Amino acid sequence: MEFNGSLIPTAPADMFMALGKNDQKIYVIPSKKMLVIRMGEVVNLDNPTLALSDFDEILQQKTSVLYQ
């Protein structure tokens, strides 16, 4: 599956990411020589998030100082 547009609009333009089961994620930002891997977490087996959570927003807030 491919998403059009940016899932994290404030992230660096060269960032790309992979989304996986149970909120597993890989973020790559070549210009910052940065790689972030989230192993994921099953929060609610009755209502899976399908790799969508607030983790993207929290990560962006915590790392935005590195992009400047």
Image (cartoon, helix red, strand yellow):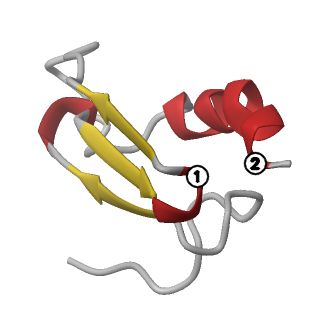
Q: Residues within 10 Å of mark 2 (few under 14, many from 20)?
A: few
Q: Nearer the viewer, residue 1 or 16?
A: 16
Q: Position of residue 15 (x, y in %)?
A: 51, 64
**Residue 38 against residue 43 in the figure, above or below:** below
Q: Secondary structure at mark 2?
A: helix
At mark 1, the secondary structure is helix
Q: Position of residue 27 (x, y in %)?
A: 39, 49
**Label 1 sits on residue:** 32
| Rendered position, 34 above or below 9 | above
User: Residue 47: x, y in percent?
Assistant: 25, 28
Which residue reaches farthest bottom?
4
Q: Earlier in the sequence, mark 2 or mark 1?
A: 1
**Residue at image x 67%, y 38%?**
60
Q: Is residue 66 above or below residue 7?
A: above
Residue 55 in the image: above or below residue 4: above
- CA–CA distance in space, label 2 to label 1: 7 Å
Residue at 13 percent across and 40 percent down: it is 21
User: Residue, x 29% and y 45% (percent of image)?
Assistant: 26
User: Looking at the rendered structure, which numbered label has been put on residue 62?
Assistant: none
Callout 2–callout 1 Cβ contact below 8 Å: yes
Q: On the picture, is 65 further left or further right than 4?
A: right
| Closer to us: 32 or 24 | 32
Q: Position of residue 57 (x, y in %)?
A: 65, 37
Based on the displayed image, in which of its 4 quarters is residue 6 positioned?
bottom right
Q: Amino acid at mark 2?
A: Tyr
Q: Which mark is residue 67?
A: 2
Q: Front-most of 8 and 13?
A: 13
Callout 1 amino acid: Lys
Going by the image, does 15 lie left or right of 23? Answer: right
